[in-house]
Image (cartoon, grey):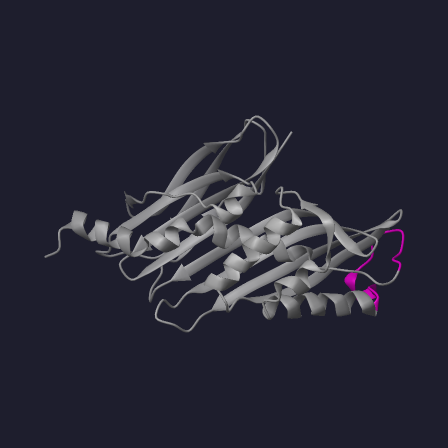
Amino acid sequence: MTNPATLLQRLSQSFTTKVKSISLDWSVFVLLTAGLTLGVPLKAQADSPETAPPQLKDTLSQIDRFANSKDVEGLLGFYGANFANSDGLSRDLMGEALVQLWQRYPLLNYRTELTDWQQEGSAIVAETVTYITSNVQDASKTKFESTLRSRQRFENQKIVYSKILAERSQITSGANPPKVTVKLPEQVRIGQRFNFDAIVTEPLGDDLLLGVAIEESVSPQRYTNPTDIDLESLAAGGIFKVGRAPLLPEDRWISAILIRGDGMIMITRRLHVVE
């Protein structure tokens, strides 16, 4: 019979590469939520997507097409030279991170929906939701699911600023990853305590469970330099953590990784810390 400590070590080693990559896997997905460019003037107040001009809808289709074909240069053509986003990304860093992501995960699929659009003076503001999925048919049985909501600002037909409003992502791997429910508020006040629960919703039987909870400040460095982590042996039931928000407003990535012998799940949520 295998010693439990030896089995835990083997499980940890077998998933080391994927676990260390979690920050890059999740955070780079947000880069494509700003993919819009406009060719016609918009109304002075927010309007529904049903009334959006055909040019705007066509542009959304173009963005999805460039993303699905992994055409970095085509995507960067939609962004101004001084583009920035709420996470501190520049246009050049965005291109670098996308190249890294698509080299490792070439079968991601993107679908973007327009939810709101309006004109602010000479600028255009649009809100979108992007769905990113992958169901790679290989030995790892890896599957991505991500939903990202963002707001873009356009000046002179170029995206000059993007803000991430919400982010919910997960990746599963293996034949039988744990089934998990996550509980986390979308927003807390500075200095406020909050609960983060990643609850396994099925019996584990005799399976051993490894896992860890990660809290990171959202920063441009994390897009290309993910944090290394150490897994821990968990009691049945999942991960239950109490955190405290920082004393300054910022966004944070809150993640959970859960691994058993025949599967793994990684889940990330974005937490907004406000005054």
Residue 19 in percent (x, y) is at 38, 51
Range of magenta residues = 41-53
Residue 147 in percent (x, y) is at 58, 57
- Image point 38% across, 55% down: which residue? 18
Decide if residue 70 is in sight here. Answer: yes
Residue 52 lies in the magenta-colored region: yes
Q: Quadrant of the N terminus?
A: bottom left
Residue 120 in percent (x, y) is at 86, 47
The outermost residue toward the bottom is 137
Q: In which quarter of the image is the C terminus?
A: top right
- Image point 67% across, 51% down: which residue? 150
- Image point 61% across, 52% down: which residue? 94
Residue 133 lies in the magenta-colored region: no
Residue 105 to residue 164: above or below: below
Q: In this view, does 15 lie to the left or right of 134?
A: left
Q: Nearer the viewer, residue 229 or 260?
A: 229
Count all numbered tags in the image, as a single digit: 0
Provide the major secondary structure of the magenta segment: loop
Q: Is residue 158 left or right of residue 224?
A: right
Decide if residue 200 is in sight here. Answer: no
Residue 54 in percent (x, y) is at 82, 70
